[in-house]
Image: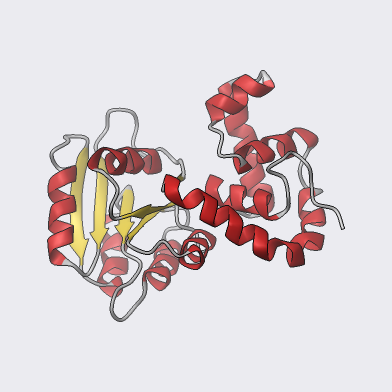
Amino acid sequence: MPGEGETISVLLVDDHTLFRSGVRSLLQRNPRFNVVGEAADGVDGVKRALQLKPDVVLLDLNMPGMSGIETLQLMLQDRPGAAVLMLTVSEEAEDLAAALQAGARGYLLKNIDADYLTRAVERAAAGESVLAESLAGKLFAHVQRGGAARAPAAVSELDKLTPREREILACLARGESNKVIARALDLAESTVKIHVQNILKKLGLSSRVQAAVFAVEHGLQSGQERRN
């Protein structure tokens, strides 16, 4: 994870040459970013990710041959916890959920503006999860539709958490940042960060977005667990 002010290395994986060229030009206008490589398909993308070890990978979802999800899974086998952001045209809730469940650090749409993209890459490199704002509602609706069948299993999972951790998990479900959570619960921001790390470890999750999905799926966004 690069420190503040350090260069962020980025790998682009997309089958459209013109799009890759545009993203490369956009990022390299900012001295904070260094596009260290490109790949036109998933197989080459996995190889380059292993070789170059970029701080952030921008990965297309729909590519010929190996899909973006398959590519993501192979990348994370070699480098668990790698910061991979899906950058796609798909707004389908199923694609979004599949990517996050597979371990993507975030999910962005190709129609986002340049500033949003650069901020997203910076946040991903810093260990945060990012999600296109327009997709949050679709994600929550999707997991809520499928959550009832998995609710009983959640009880044992949630029992792993302390009351404070459950409280913070509910805040994550509402999309609150560490700073907002700290202010609301009268905690130090560093303490919130430690709680979030513990939540992810206990639940076997790899990102804040996955934690938010888990929480919404089990009725925690209102601060109340779903009971049968």
Relative to 199, does residue 164 appear above or below in the rendering? above
168 lies left or right of 137: right
- Give the quadrant of the N terminus: top left
Quadrant position of residue 149: bottom right
Seen at 54% across and 62% down, the residue is: 101
Of 12 and 145, which appears nearest the observer?
145
Relative to 153, does residue 125 appear above or below in the rendering? above
Of 55 and 68, which appears nearest the observer?
68
Asked if residue 207 can be seen in this view, the reply is: no
- Give the quadrant of the C terminus: bottom right
Q: Residue furthest bottom?
A: 65
Q: Position of residue 8 (x, y in %)?
A: 27, 41
Q: Position of residue 174 (x, y in %)?
A: 60, 39
Seen at 77% across and 57% down, the residue is: 154
Relative to 148, does residue 197 appear above or below in the rendering? above
Seen at 68% across and 43% down, the residue is: 221
Seen at 25% across and 46% down, the residue is: 9
Quadrant position of residue 142: bottom right
40 lies left or right of 42: left
74 lies left or right of 173: left
Q: Position of residue 137 (x, y in %)?
A: 53, 51
Asked if residue 111 can be seen in this view, the reply is: yes
